[in-house]
Amino acid sequence: MSLDHILLGLLREPATGYDLKNAFSDTVRHFWSAELSQIYPTLKRLEQRRMLRSRLEPSPKGPNRRVYTLTDEGRDELLRWLRGGPVVGTERFAYLAQLYFMDAVGDIDETRAFMTALRDHLSRWLAQLWAVERDVIATYGDAPERYSDAGFHHFAALRMGIHSIGSKVAWCNETLAAIDRRPAGARGAASAPHDEPREQQEDPS
């Protein structure tokens, strides 16, 4: 999955770059994030590839705004991506890479602080998703099978975000509990699961 396809999906309705940034913040942030510094160059590239077109429109306040619209070529590319089957194996989590190498710090208290900060961040994120879910249910009811086509698919993606972030919060709590159970001086006492077994030394006798 690429930012190109996310923008093509969001631009089924005309939007400005600022509108798109708000969409990332408000609707799709549980599975994709992007800053304006990434959005605008991608929009320009997609327009050069004739997947988008843009026009200047008067703004209610300030200078004119540039509005982007999906072209037939862009719509065809979006459908090709959607019909190509699930795109898996592309997820990357920087915090897991940090945790993987955290033993280089040599201080389990720093690992505890790291995991606590991560848990707090994820917990806030989860609370935001729960708030969105409550708003959706309050507005459209608690039977997603009766939602509109767009509403149904958006709610399914939201529920996956809730499950995903919720499981990460549970993992943080599990890891913090394991840290608290570690005996003093346990660093390096046992091989990690990925370590290769050492050859048994021969008895010198």
Image (spheres, helix red, strand yellow):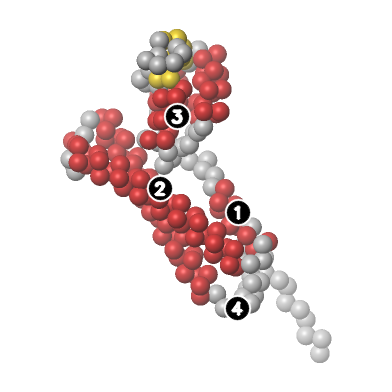
Give residue 96's position: percent from left, percent from top. Answer: 55, 53
Residue designated by label 1? 98
Give residue 45's position: percent from left, percent from top. Answer: 55, 19
Residue designated by label 2? 125
Q: In 3D space, how far apart are the residues under numbered discs 3 and 2 (Cα atoms)?
A: 18 Å
Q: Are marks 4 and 2 in contact (CB under 8 Å)?
A: no
- Snapshot quadrant of residue 77: top left
Give residue 123's position: percent from left, percent from top. Answer: 40, 53
Crowding near pointer 4: few (<14 within 10 Å), some, many (20+)? few
Residue designated by label 4? 184
Q: Amino acid at mark 1?
A: Gln
Q: First in sequence: mark 4 or mark 2? A: 2
Q: In 3D space, how far apart are the residues under numbered discs 1 and 4 (Cα atoms)?
A: 23 Å
Give residue 115's position: percent from left, percent from top. Answer: 52, 60
Q: Are marks 1 and 2 in contact (CB under 8 Å)?
A: no
Q: First in sequence: mark 3 or mark 2? A: 3
Position of residue 52 relative to residue 95, above or below, is above
- Residue farthest along the bottom direction in this orientation: 205
Q: Nearer the viewer, mark 3 or mark 1?
A: 3
Position of residue 130 relative to residue 8, above or below, is below
Q: Amino acid at mark 4?
A: Ala
Q: Secondary structure at mark 4?
A: loop
Q: First in sequence: mark 3 or mark 1? A: 3
